[in-house]
Amino acid sequence: MSRKRILIMGAAGRDFHNFNTFFRDQEEYEVVVFTATQIPDIEGRQYPAELSGGLYPQGIPIESEENLSVLIRDKEIDIVVFSYSDVSHETVMHKASIVLSTGADFWFLGPKKTSIKSKKPVVSICAVRTGCGKSQTTRRVCEVLQSFGKKVVAIRHPMPYGNLIEQRVQRFSKLADLDTHKCTIEEREEYEPHINKGITVYAGVDYGDIIRAAEEEADVVVWDGGNNDLPFYQSDCHIVVVDPHRAGHELKYHPGEANLRLADAIVVNKIDSADFADIKTVQANIMKFAPEAVMIEAASPLFVDDPSIIRDKRVLVIEDGPTLTHGEMKYGAGIVAATKLGAGEIVDPRPFTVGSITETFQKYPEIGTLLPAMGYGDQQIKDLQETINNFDGEAVVIATPIDLRRLVKFNVPATRVRYELQEIGQPTLEDVLRKFSEKV
């Protein structure tokens, strides 16, 4: 019987995981090609033979999603598997319509087929959208588990933008490991805060190999999810973060709605800055679509290293890149801090952009008057630095999860804005995690 010919649509994360866990050793299927989107410079590469198993001695090509219908026809694809995250339900169905119009089938793979069982307890932290506050929630979860005397190891959703063979299993326990593995800004933003708290982080490409390594040194594994993707592991306690600044999005994005419906506990973040009506909308949706989940209210208070650098100055605000691009947020902690602390003017960065940063604004014109900290590779980091230093203002507000001054030279004074999760009232994450720890 001829093998079914498969195309996997992805963004260098869920797509590779779906292949590794479901397709890699199945003779019934032949994965002919991956397509790539969301992340720059992924297409044109190869998923290497060393990671592909015995059925793929030549590896698997990765091509741009832009030519999807042509690829399906030219490569005689039978089944297209949608395998990336934080896209609207409408967008998903437009993709499905393209696929169906070629005659191919359109698939999703569910958690039963792709979630790996760990020998250790797993707490997963995910979200309904990029930029909900998942990172500070994950840090808070790790802090609580450590206070219970647990050895916590975090496993981060994949960001394999370099050599995939070298990135098969990555371990980060000290800041020097970030340089050893040539981490991008996006990777550093997620790994560095954990390392500073004494938590070892694993990431990479093959999450079966990764969990076996992490289990050797963990009492509890914390899955630190990315975008709004589902966990790669079977979760014993699934915590999901929602954002009332984007009320209603919890029901409009894939697979964020699935996360909401799967949740054991839901953190309604940013209630200190969101409109009351929007908070109530989100809470009503939780009660209707995830009625058994524990609902936790939380804020993300800001901490500014040196407020005097902002007051009355013409400032450039730098925010987390993915939150502004496919996360579609119009502002973040930096804009809030600059406004609250009396900046004289928030300067539009677009006249100063170069190279890939200019291209980012062309692709995401709704970003507006703030600068996304894009850094998916060395050239993009160079373009970011040149853009910052073309700026003709008086100060820079850094509102990224890491201090960019470790990677980028600033020609004007800069101050950093940080944020942490703060639960309001009860129940708290500690309440949820104490019950979880008693069970395991």
Image (cartoon, rainbow, N blue to C red):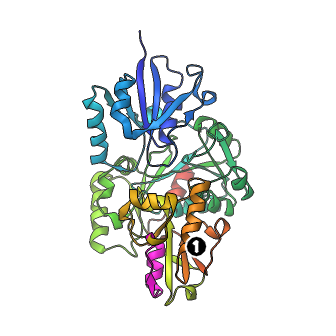
Residue at 51%, 63% in the rendered image: 354
* Residue at far bottom of view: 312
Between 47 and 281, the one lying in front of the other is 47
The region drawn magenta spans 332-350
The 10 Å Cα crowd at callout 1, few under 14, some 14 to 19, many 20 or more, is: some
**Label 1 SS:** helix
Q: Residue at x 39, y 75 (%)?
A: 273
Does residue 65 show up?
yes
Q: Amino acid at mark 1?
A: Asn
Q: Nearer the viewer, residue 3 or 426?
A: 3
Q: Which residue is mark 1?
A: 389
Question: x%, y% of residue 164?
Answer: 62, 39
User: Does 345 appear in magenta?
Assistant: yes
274 or 334, nearer to the observer: 334
Please give left or right for residue 33 compared with residue 213 in the image. left
Going by the image, does 49 lie left or right of 19?
Answer: right
Please state the horizontal and vertical placement of residue 8, each as a whole percent of the image: 43, 33
